[in-house]
Amino acid sequence: MNVADSERLSRALEKLGYQSTNLADEADIIVLNTCVVRQSAEDKALGRLNSLKPLKSAKPHLIIAVMGCLVGNKGNPALEKRFPWVDAFSAPSDPESILRTVRERHASLFEPISKTGEDDITSLLQEEFGIYTSNQHAVSENLPIVLGCSHACAYCIIPSKRGREISRDPKRIIEEAKTMVARGAKEIVLLGQIVDRYGLDRDDGIHLAELLAMVNDIDGLERIRFLTSHPNYFTDDMIKAVATLPKVMPHIELPIQAGDDEVLKAMRRGYTNAQYRDIIAHIRDLMPDVSIGTDIIVGFPGESEAAFDETYKLLADLKLDVAHLARYSPRPGTYSERFLADDVSADEKMRRFRKLESLQKQVVGEINQRFLGQSVPVLFEERAKGKWRGRSPHNRLVFVESDEILLGQIRDVHIDWAGPWSLLGTLS
Ligand code: SAH
């Protein structure tokens, strides 16, 4: 979501005449887009921000802006007070104040910003800027379809930073998707904190399954992905959509977060271990060749050794394709931070994390063996370190050495080597 927000802002800045650079020393504007989902992310954002102060002192016209969840959607006077030398602060998905600051502060310095009036900013925001498309002309583009979140999991800070859940207008989404495809995108990733709740807050009857069908009809688009789903909203219509729509890739991100029912209840996730197992079994029944990812938090308040074992057993039994693991981090203002003691030690959280990590490495290592000797269609996204990098339908990273220009192409790849985190192959 942050990548999508950053790309959108960067596109608006290019419209104002700026160019992107990888060198902070060269920049006239530096925007830090921030995440605070865990303390480590917040610390990183604050550290990075502090490191920019000397640049700002050396170059007065430099604009330094902070956006995203460190700011939040209600303004953040404490942050502004702590960093008086920062020029603009803006909410997640809403960088209007950054654009206005840029216009005010740089108007006398640069062409063509000097000609950019109030109306231009407004139209940038309403038209061009409203469009979520990057200027990178990426093969795979992120397209937010649900903004904010209203679920309020006990541990999660996102609802209080990104605001309530809002499904975006399907007409707008399709328009943006078509623009992305016209600019060269081959894959679109539809995003939402709980993406399978898309449309439940609207009355046009277009839910995620219907939206997927609409995106599937876009000529020139090859692949569609979506994340992240919540088990309670992953209906049979969704399973059918993934199984039958040719462009929708067979990969589902369906976080469980914990395996123990008491912990799940305290997390306010809204399902039990057995219900999660049932939905996975049901999905696999209807769609045997599907890849499933999950998220897990270890060390949530009150997670005993026995409770942790439930998570371990679940991962060992279900053999999911990906597990994004995190150690519980109390976030200010969340239910668990306010009312539940952070009673699993840092060392113990690390031990549980490592235990799941090594289990999962073994599980995925085994799953990936079945691709050995097979041919899989890979969409190539990038060339890095002498190899082309792409993804298989199951969202596996695939690396290929080739002198051909493979960017944006889907080619059959014969898999010669399979490890837990990637596959290597040759063009077949
Ligand atoms: N709605 C998105 C949430 C994005 S945050 C989703 O369901 O994927 C991504 C992951 O971060 C969450 O799934 C959760 O596993 C983890 N997370 C969220 N809050 C956390 C916290 N306080 N401590 C540790 N991990 C957390």
Image (tube, rainbow, N blue to C red):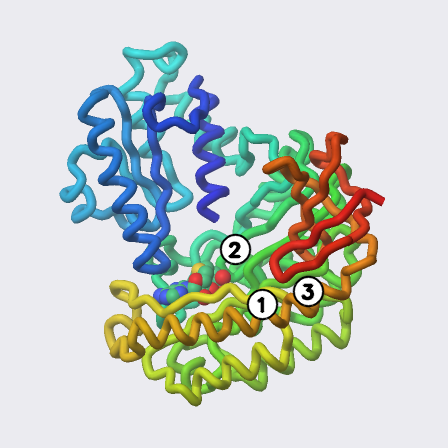
Above or below, 422 against 137 in this view is: below
Q: Nearer the viewer, mark 3 or mark 2?
A: 3
Kindly identify which numbered label has been placed on residue 192.
Answer: 2
Amino acid beneath label 2 = Gly
Q: Nearer the viewer, mark 1 or mark 2?
A: 1
Amino acid beneath label 1 = Lys
Task: Please give the residue where the numbered disc 3 appears in the rendered image.
Answer: 291
Above or below, 335 against 124 in this view is: below
**SS at circle 2:** loop
What percent of the width, then of the height, locates residue 101?
Answer: 29, 27
Kindly identify which numbered label has been placed on residue 29.
Answer: none
Toward the right, the furthest residue is 428
Task: Please give the residue where the numbered disc 1 appears in the rendered image.
Answer: 361
**Image quadrant occupied by the C terminus:** top right
Say which quarter of the image contains residue 222: top right
**SS at circle 3:** strand
Q: Are marks 3 and 1 in contact (CB under 8 Å)?
A: no
What percent of the width, then of the height, locates residue 269?
Answer: 46, 75
Would you say 116 lies left or right of 74 here? right
